[in-house]
Image (cartoon, rainbow, N blue to C red):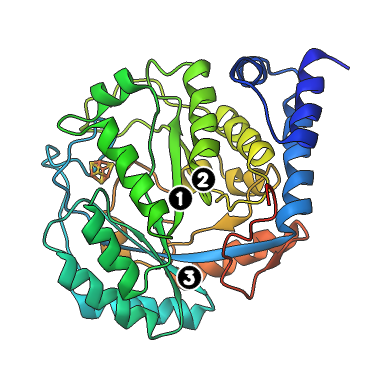
Amino acid sequence: MTEITELIEKAQTTHSLKKDELVSVLNDNSANDILFKTADIVRKKYVGDEVHLRGLIEFSNICKCSCFYCGLRKDNPSVQRYRMTAEQIIELAQNAKDYGYKTVVLQSGEDAFFDTKKLCKIISSIKSLGLALTLSAGEKTYEEYKAYKQAGADRYLLRIETTDKNLYAKLHPSMSFENRVRCLKDLKTLGFEVGTGCLVGLPQQSDESLANDILFFKELDADMIGLGPFIPCPNTPLENEKGGTLIKALKVMALTRLLLPDINIPATTAMETLQPNGRILALQSGANVVMPDVTEQDCKQKYTIYPGKAGLNNTALDYKNSIVKNIESIGRTISEGYGFHNKIFGK
Ligand code: SF4
């Protein structure tokens, strides 16, 4: 046994590693296969073979923020902006239900048009369809989050993106790391299932910083973690930077599975974008969720957080059928349930 395989085994049995131990595993590529296999075993033990499908609705690409890595940043004039009506959003939720999805994820830029009243109305209409609802609409006040919860929202996604405060400040003009953390804590207090995550492979991001990200997920007691390899986007300040790798993103994901064994972890579209079988590799390295896009083609093409997004040219139904086929081809099944976080570890 090498030092790295010993650390992987320790993580498998104790679900805990110190920062320097996480850094050692992240730094060393000699046991990647063992790391991925071990994360797969832990995934099977704690969350089983079912894959939860969540239908993604990208309802507005208008954003008041200017995150350096994001194609939707307000300072990018090349984006054709759109905003769906409440009726369009609800119709897409109904479509998602018809495709057999049990959850919809409503995602947008930070678009002030959707004030609390408008958003709560949409939330309650979708909840009346019998779907679980995840919201991903950015930083809000405690009172706003509370209103969403009372309207029926079940989950909220807000990635921390990086826990390196200096890097966070460089990449997020006019935003504050402290407020981001405040939002996540408020969401936890209010009883949401909370999803967060980070970008992997950002310029100047170190393995120490990624280790801190994983420890942050554990400290927050997150219910879901989404990890995206950083993909440089044209017309952003980071367009000429080197992108992140699939392997590093999978390693952060596998370590997250080992340390938070019973949470939900999506095989992200960004992983599939970097490599055609990226999603399947992720499902075999700790992931148990897929979020197929149900947004109509014309809007989907304009939701350009990063370039070359996988599945852009498929209809929602074709996309679903091909994802289901791929999932079943590796012996996994599609969940019939809502896929809430079933807390087993640490109870
Ligand atoms: S990452 Fe989110 S908040 Fe930042 S610019 Fe893009 S859509 Fe807006």
Quick check: 56 left or right of 176? right
Q: Tag on residue 225?
A: 2
Q: Which residue is mark 1?
A: 195
Q: Is residue 142 above or below residue 320?
A: above
Q: What residue do we see at 28% from left, 33% from top?
A: 178
Residue 98 picture location, percent across and down:
48, 83
Visible residue check, residue 91: no
Residue 265 picture location, percent across and down:
57, 49
Cα–Cα gap, marks 1 and 3: 14 Å
Q: What residue do we see at 37% from left, 19% from top?
A: 203
Disc 2: CA contacts within 10 A as few (<14), some (14-19) or many (>=20): many
Under circle 3, the secondary element is: strand
Quick check: 284 left or right of 228? right
Q: Quadrant of the N terminus?
A: top right
Mark 2 vs ligand 1: CB under 8 Å?
no
Quick check: 5 left or right of 130? right
Under circle 1, the secondary element is: strand
Q: Earlier in the sequence, mark 1 or mark 3?
A: 3
**CB contact under 8 Å: marks 1 and 2:** yes
**CB contact under 8 Å: marks 1 and 3:** no
Q: Which residue is mark 3?
A: 103
Q: What residue do we see at 22% from left, 25% from top?
A: 237
Q: Is residue 90 above or below residue 133?
A: below
